[in-house]
Image (cartoon, grey):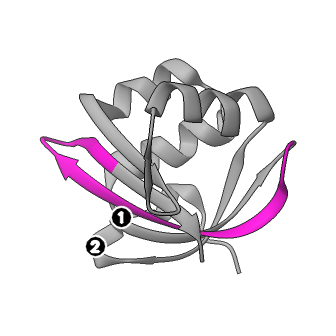
Amino acid sequence: MTIAVSKLSDPAVRGFVTAINAGDRAAFQAVLAPDATMSDDGSDRDLADWTEREIFGAGGRMAVQTESDGGHALVANFTNDTWGEMRTAWRFTIDGGRISRFETGQA
């Protein structure tokens, strides 16, 4: 069962998922803190390079399955044109209403 994006608890996380699913780079940048960082499968990555390669340049989209920790932790089926569909975990750090860090990896 998928959770509607509009029902996600945290506004920044809701904006993050909405921007990914819409392929909207500007909206995605707007929900991130200026110095935001990220990791994939436990390794820090260059955020701009990773998001272009895994999300925006590859038709990335998220179907959220579960939400926990006040909306700061998601399990989602993430799909892109490179890897197909995989079950992924996402954890967000919110600072001043924007995402300062996100961590993702296989769930």
Q: Which residues are magenta?
A: 82-101
- Number of residues whose C-alpha sits closer than 10 Å to that of mark 1, classed few (under 14), some (14–19) or many (20 or more): some
Residue 66 shown left or right of residue 106 in the figure: left
Residue 94, percent from left and from top: 22, 51
Quadrant in the picture for the N terminus: bottom right
- Residue at coordinates 60% horizontally, 63% vertically from top-left? 4
Q: Secondary structure at mark 2?
A: helix
| Residue 73 on the magenta segment | no
Q: Quick check: 5 left or right of 11? A: right
Residue at image coords 57%, 35%? 50
Q: Which residue is mark 1?
A: 9
Q: Position of residue 57 (x, y in %)?
A: 74, 26
Going by the numbered disc 2, the residue's amino acid type is Gly
The answer to whether residue 107 is left or right of residue 73 is: right
Q: Residue at x 60, y 77 (%)?
A: 107
Residue 23: in sight, yes or no?
A: no
Main SS category, magenta section: strand
Give residue 79's position: percent from left, percent from top.
Answer: 78, 54
Question: Which tag, 1 or 2, sits closer to the chain's start?
Answer: 1
Q: Residue furthest front?
A: 43
Report if residue 89 is visible in the image.
yes
In the image, which is nearer the foreground, mark 1 or mark 2? 2
Pick the front one: 79 or 31:
79
Q: Are marks 1 and 2 in contact (CB under 8 Å)?
A: yes
Residue indicated by mark 2: 70
Image quadrant in which you'd find residue 33: top left
